Amino acid sequence: MQRSRGGTAIHLPVWLALGWATGLDERTPLLFGAAAAGFGLIAALRFALESTLKQLSMRRHRLARRLFLALLLSNPALWGLLSAWVSLQPPTASAAYAIWMVVTGVSAAGGLLLSIDTVVRKSYAALAVLPGSVALASAGAHAPLFPVVATLLLLAYVYRASAGVYDDYWARLQARVELEEHARQLERLSRTDALTQVYNRQYFDRQLGIECARAARDGLPLSLVMIDIDHFKRVNDTYGHPFGDACLQAVARALRDALYRPADVLARYGGEEFIALLPATDAAAGVGVAARLHGCVSALSLSHPSGSVPLTCSVGLLTMRSVAHTTPAIALNHADQALYAAKQQGRNRVVVATPA
């Protein structure tokens, strides 16, 4: 739609200039006025319906496309009818040649510029040049053969050249789409822990800084939950590291499923340690989320050839009621102290830190 926008308004001025230069406006005022009205109406409808067609394309894409193509192809069709008319009843030789020159220019320019659409590529140039060629060919033995042959050769050239433009455009568009998707994949990889497929520590640290600044600005509470799998070294030593990796993946899935809000961030903080960032979460809600995270790990029981392997975790919770004077480093330190207290008290429990 954007490609055709500039060319839509060109046809009427070109017709007016052609008519005044060749005297068509005086010799055939009815034809001149009707053609001018046709070009003007097409341009007016094109610009008046632009926003409507955009909205319609979201709901009924095929109908919007058909209406747009009908408006777009009306201009070359009108030029084709005009060329057919001058081929059968040329008012003057200068007018006939001028119209033929304009028609060939319209067919070449529109057929190549707008050839990214299959229907336009096959129809635009043909609508402009074939009516005049057919009319001239049917005029009899006295009709000049050169314009017919020349326009048919032009039509063949435009069709062949437009095929190359069409292929190049869509190939480049496909390459761009693939490049953008590759960039998105790299961005996802840069923020994702490869083993557990939750966020990595680098991404978490960045989000913690953002959420601390937002909480300080808006006066909202912020909660951190640190989770450490109990006796995980014993699991690795007893069952092997591949099984330990499977445990980490299962724990990550369980923790991720236990966080219901899109704004909550779960990350692997290192080794067997995970951390959750809970924006706009007060102490009461933080205790509820921490208990849910603790419970989802305790509910896991992984199967090993030697038997079932239960897992537990220690959880440290920090809720900051005022973040104005708290840095991310201080917040992490408080949450880590709460986790350490949970381990010191016997593990498999939730300990709430003193609010900062």
Image (tube, helix red, strand yellow):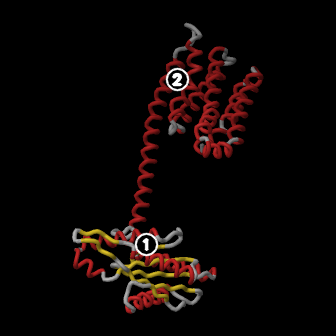
Q: Are marks 2 and 1 in contact (CB under 8 Å)?
A: no
Residue 139 picture location, percent across and down: 59, 10
Regarding residue 259, the answer to whether it shows in the image is: yes
- Which residue lies under the disc numbered 1? 255
Q: Is residue 227 left or right of residue 89?
A: left
Residue 321 picture location, percent across and down: 59, 86
Q: Nearer the viewer, residue 154 or 165?
A: 165
* Residue at (62% x, 44% y) in the render: 59
Can you tell which quarter of the image residue 123 is in?
top right
Q: CA distance from mark 2 to mark 1?
A: 71 Å
Identify the secondary structure beneath mark 2.
helix
Tell me the kind of residue under disc 2: Thr
- Which residue lies under the disc numbered 2? 151
Q: Nearer the viewer, residue 172 or 310?
A: 310
* Residue at (64% x, 30% y) in the render: 74
Identify the secondary structure beneath mark 1.
helix
Compared with 124, 202 (above or below) is below
Compared with 173, 343 (above or below) is below
Q: Residues within 10 Å of mark 1 (few under 14, many from 20)?
A: many
Residue 119 picture location, percent across and down: 53, 32
Compared with 341, 13 (above or below) is above
Residue furthest to the front = 307
First in sequence: mark 2 or mark 1? 2
Compared with 255, 58 (above or below) is above
Q: Nearer the viewer, residue 279 or 249?
A: 249
